[in-house]
Image (cartoon, rainbow, N blue to C red):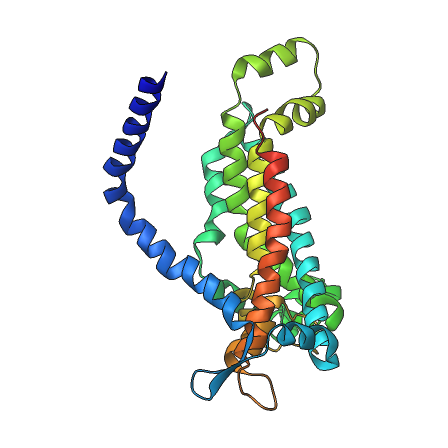
């Protein structure tokens, strides 16, 4: 037994040494550009000031200010609530439409599925700034108003992006429209990997299409559902570009479209009005809390959906 264990250790060691030169460049890039900045941001959240003016250790004071100083806490909790709402819309609209479209695209009676897949995925290939600007024009009553009145859709002539009650919803739906192709294609790939004999056996047993979908297909693609939910969660809690393209980094109108990403940019990079001086410590505190929130959501989802069953 001792000889076998020694041999196994040698084999494992040789395997690692054999593959390490190939993964070393990617590992170096990951550590230098991902892991080290993450750890350094955790360190910077305990300091105030900048490299030019000098940093001073303040411990957890940045976190305390973020939750106790009225100006900071009001902006943070507002952005946090908007981000959660932004994420919920994507989970309900984007992912539900994605699995619905994927189910239709994988049915045997569906014709021209490649054409429809291309149409659904096409917005993903466009730049966010381009789609954001185009939708900003479409939702502008000055630009789209005359056409909508011509086709008797006067009720749609509204300042959708200029109203606090509708601005964030419109931006979230535009984001869903652009990125719908990604979950759809992932669901399509997962559904096509389901064994045909299982579906044929269920059909012979008289299973209805809804029962087939809910009790057979969904449990079999549960790992993919979990991955898509995680990607949606992470991407939406880091969302910035779509708000920047359709509104601005101040979360207009009246901070109603302010997300954690735009708040972090204003505080830690650009500096908030009227001072305009970046507070790197407070900004990294926001980033650190976001990282903790992401871990609290991602880890349980992985455990629940990526099991051995």
**Total numbered labels placed on residues in the image:** 0
Q: Position of residue 43 (x, y in %)?
A: 51, 69
Q: Residue at x 28, y 27 (%)?
A: 11
Quarter of the figure with residue 207: top right
Query: Percent position (x, y) of residue 230?
Result: 58, 46
Q: Quadrant of the C terminus?
A: top right
| Residue at (65, 42) in percent of width and height | 96
Residue 303 or residue 173, whichever sits in front: 303
Q: Position of residue 49 (x, y in %)?
A: 52, 84
- Tell me where residue 127 appears, x and y as whole percent: 44, 61
Q: Is residue 39 above or below residue 107?
A: below
Q: Is residue 212 positioned above or below 152 on the image?
A: above
In the rendered image, is residue 238 in sight?
A: yes
Q: Residue at x 51, y 46 (%)?
A: 181
Does residue 1 sit above or below 170 in this rendering? above
Residue farthest to the front?
2
Q: Nearer the viewer, residue 290 or 144?
A: 290
Q: Is residue 134 visible?
A: no
Quadrant hosting residue 67 = bottom right
Residue 174 vs 197, above or below: the answer is below
Q: Quadrant of the N terminus?
A: top left
Residue occupying image coordinates x 23% and y 44%? 21
């Amino acid at each position: 037994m001792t000889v076998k264990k020694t041999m196994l250790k040698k084999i494992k060691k040789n395997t690692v040494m054999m593959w390490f030169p190939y993964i070393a460049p990617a590992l170096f890039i990951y550590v230098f550009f991902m892991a080290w900045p993450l750890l350094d941001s955790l360190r910077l959240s305990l300091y105030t000031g900048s490299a030019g003016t000098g940093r001073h250790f303040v411990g957890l004071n940045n976190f305390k200010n973020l939750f106790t100083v009225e100006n900071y806490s009001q902006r943070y909790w507002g952005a946090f609530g908007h981000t959660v709402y932004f994420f919920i819309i994507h989970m309900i609209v984007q992912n539900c439409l994605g699995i619905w479209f994927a189910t239709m695209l994988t049915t045997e009676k569906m014709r021209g599925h490649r054409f429809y897949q291309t149409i659904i995925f096409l917005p993903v290939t466009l730049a966010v700034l381009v789609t954001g600007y185009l939708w900003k024009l479409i939702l502008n009553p000055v630009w789209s108003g005359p056409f909508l009145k011509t086709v008797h859709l006067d009720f749609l002539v509204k300042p959708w992006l200029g109203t606090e009650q509708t601005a964030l919803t419109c931006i979230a739906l535009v984001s869903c429209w652009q990125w719908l192709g990604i979950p759809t294609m992932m669901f399509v790939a997962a559904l096509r990997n389901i064994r045909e004999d299982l579906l044929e056996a269920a059909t012979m047993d008289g299973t209805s299409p809804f029962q087939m979908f809910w009790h057979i297909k969904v449990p079999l693609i549960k790992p993919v559902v979990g991955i898509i939910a995680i990607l949606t969660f992470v991407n939406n809690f880091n969302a910035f570009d779509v708000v920047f393209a359709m509104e601005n980094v101040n979360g207009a109108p009246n901070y109603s479209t302010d997300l954690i990403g735009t708040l972090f940019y204003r505080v830690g990079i650009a500096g908030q009005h009227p001072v305009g001086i970046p507070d790197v410590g407070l900004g990294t505190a926001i980033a650190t809390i976001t990282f903790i929130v992401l871990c609290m959501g991602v880890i349980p989802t992985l455990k629940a959906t990526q099991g051995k069953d």
